[in-house]
Amino acid sequence: MAGRNRSSITYDAPPLVEVAMSIQFDPPNGLNQAHLGAFWVTQKHELPRVRALQPITASYDDFGGERQWLPPSLQLALTNEPDCRLQMISLDDQWVCQVQRNRLVLNWRKRSEGYPRFSAAWDRFLTAWEAWPAFLVDYQLEGIRSRLWELTYVNRIPNDRLWEKPSDWPNVFPGLWGGGFSVVEGAELRGFQGRWVWESLDPPAHLYVEPNPGRSAEDPLRDVLLLSLTARGVIREDNRTGKPSQSDLIECAMAFGHDWIVDTFDKITSDSAKKAWGRHVDSE
């Protein structure tokens, strides 16, 4: 896979609060909710808590085509069979594995001061991903045809040292807002909603950067700036002799997405924010 050089940028104390790795695939014929429950039984030693939720909406990006950005609200119903998403959760509430008919997701959620490196999250995702097709084989269900990979990083920046009100956001991320917001007489800017989209042609992928106002989970009266960066791309089939495994292709794609997210976050962030979050470059 062609792509960028591996990122060597590191933040000692980033505002990162969630990481999500996901693979979207064609629903195996015959898979139903009972199978999802049976899969949890194989995982409950690591993820003992479980609950059922509505499924995540399928993604339908147009890569390299007419560049139609499809809104998340669009859905395509291909089956009349009832569907759900099974959410399996670790005892410390930090790790979540989610599985539904057409997607498997691994989430890390910040519940303490530390945060995992990309390699730690990938190892957990790989364990779940390799367990899923093995489970399908045991139940004589068809193999998985993977379609899309997705990696999301969610950052939460409270209004303290770096900003006091939304009009200060360009001071934190000048790469998104090149200058200050216009002043409207008699009104105060309370927030901003929008989405930036970048496209990579090789490999075919999109990067979505979306800032949103929010409130702190710990202090509901405190304003926060939520910044999510999502990289999503095609899982290419490789027909060469000695072709890499699906896991190898997915690892390469996720690593590309990680570096793209890290490099973009670094480019849009102000020097003062980088200093506050302990930015440095690892030596080779």
Image (cartoon, helix red, strand yellow):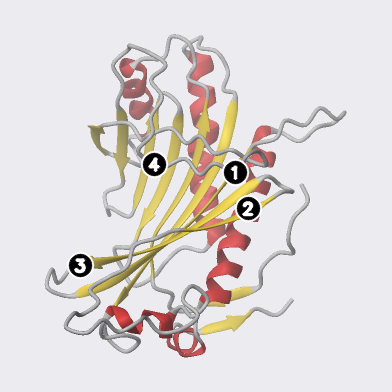
Q: Which one is earlier in the sequence, the residue at label 2 or at label 3? A: 2
Q: CA distance from mark 3 to mark 1?
A: 33 Å
List the residue tagged with mark 4: 72
Give residue 199's mark. Answer: 2
Secondary structure under badge 4?
A: loop
Q: Are marks 2 and 3 in contact (CB under 8 Å)?
A: no
In-front residue for pair 47/235: 235
List the residue tagged with mark 3: 215
Question: Residue 175 at x, y = what percent?
Answer: 52, 76
Mark 1 vs mark 4: in front: 1
Residue 220 shown left or right of residue 60 in the figure: left
**Can you say which quadrant of the picture contains the C terminus?**
bottom right
Q: CA distance from mark 3 to mark 4?
A: 22 Å
To which quarter of the image does residue 13 belong? bottom left
Which residue is rendered at x = 18% and y = 79% of the image?
Answer: 187
List the residue tagged with mark 1: 67
To which quarter of the image does residue 226 belong? bottom left
Q: Judge the density around disc 3: few (<14), some (14-19), many (≥20) Cα neighbours within 10 Å.
A: some
Mark 2 vs mark 1: in front: 1
The three-letter amino acid code for the residue at tag 3 is: Arg
Secondary structure under badge 2?
A: strand
Q: CA distance from mark 1 to mark 4?
A: 15 Å
To which quarter of the image does residue 227 belong? bottom left
The three-letter amino acid code for the residue at tag 1 is: Arg
